[in-house]
Amino acid sequence: MKLTQQQLEEFDREGYLFLPECFSREETKVLTDELPGIFAQKRDEVWREKDGEAVRTAFAAHTYNEAFRRLGAHPRLIEPVQQLLGGRVYMHQYKINAKRAFDGDVWQWHQDYGTWARDDLMPEPRAMNIALFLDDVTEFNGPLMFIPRSHKAGVMEAGHDLVSTSYPLWTLDKATVSRLAKEGGLVAPKGPAGSVLLFHCNLVHASPSNISPYDRTIVYLSLCEVNNHIRQFKRKEWIAHRDFTPIDPLSDDCLQEMARETAA
């Protein structure tokens, strides 16, 4: 899947791009059918909220689940990022953020590259996130919020928050977020399951807690240009991957093929 010149310009200007209904309901069902089995596993990669029960994030599902392995090499996700970064990419991080109904906790205001630079020694911000909605995302169930154009400010000073949630995060202070929001405003892209979000690794973003009765599950592929691979291996390998092999995209119907195999 190739982005148009208008889309490339919008991404450069705003720091994100929203592509509604990029995947069909049939394709997303292949993935959502796998979630209960993944979330039930008692493994380190399945990170839980402070209550110790609700799943917060399932890391590296592409290494232990076939459907999510295929998604991690899907051309509709890999090719736009290669186009934007101008080269081949490897999987720096892969996570399924669950944000479960009633129990999904907040993700504080942060920049992803701030963490990748500080914790992983990624040399430059030549990496980005591309995310797939597995549930309908509404104003009620904890949508991702962006500050448009904040990626133009570069990496900002951050503090290491070890207490707010179960997951440690380099976060921005209130004064910085307020200043940026005054300049760029706030947006919260919403849409049906199957929609895709691309966003720059320096774009400031967050999401509120989900107190609604509706799950809000999003899969995030954090893709890095291969020559920009991390230099420090401080975090667990399933959080910050150490396999820098370029991803070869699969066929566009790889998830539909799996649906046909399951139905046969």
Image (cartoon, rainbow, N blue to C red):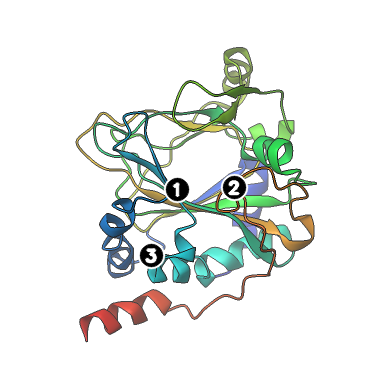
Which corner quadrant holds the C terminus? bottom left
Mark 2 sits on what residue? 236
Work out whether mark 2 precedes mark 3 in sequence or the reverse, and give the earlier one. Answer: 3
Q: Earlier in the sequence, mark 1 or mark 3?
A: 3
Q: Position of residue 156 (x, y in %)?
A: 71, 27
With 73 as the anchor, is 261 left or right in this view?
A: left
| Residue name at image x 68 percent, y 51 percent | 127
Question: Can see residue 202?
Answer: no
User: Given this view, does label 1 or label 3 mark the residue nearer the observer?
Assistant: 1
Of residues 164 and 89, the one nearer the viewer is 164
Query: What label sits on residue 212 in the rendered view?
Result: none
The foreground one among 47 and 245 is 47
List x then y, in percent, for residue 163. 49, 21
Location of residue 176 by image quarter? top right
Residue that appears at 51% across and 65% down: 72
**In what element is the residue under mark 2?**
loop
| Circle 1/circle 2 CB separation < 8 Å | yes
User: Residue beneath label 1, please?
Assistant: 44
**Distance from the alpha carbon under mark 1 to that under mark 2:** 10 Å
Give the secondary structure at mark 1: loop
- Residue positioned 57% across, 50% down in the render: 129
Which residue is tagged 3? 23
Q: In this orientation, does residue 69 appear?
A: yes
- Which residue corresponds to the image point at 30% horizontal and 36% vertical from the top-left? 141
Give, as a three-letter code, the residue at label 1: Asp
Q: Residues within 10 Å of mark 3 (few under 14, many from 20)?
A: some
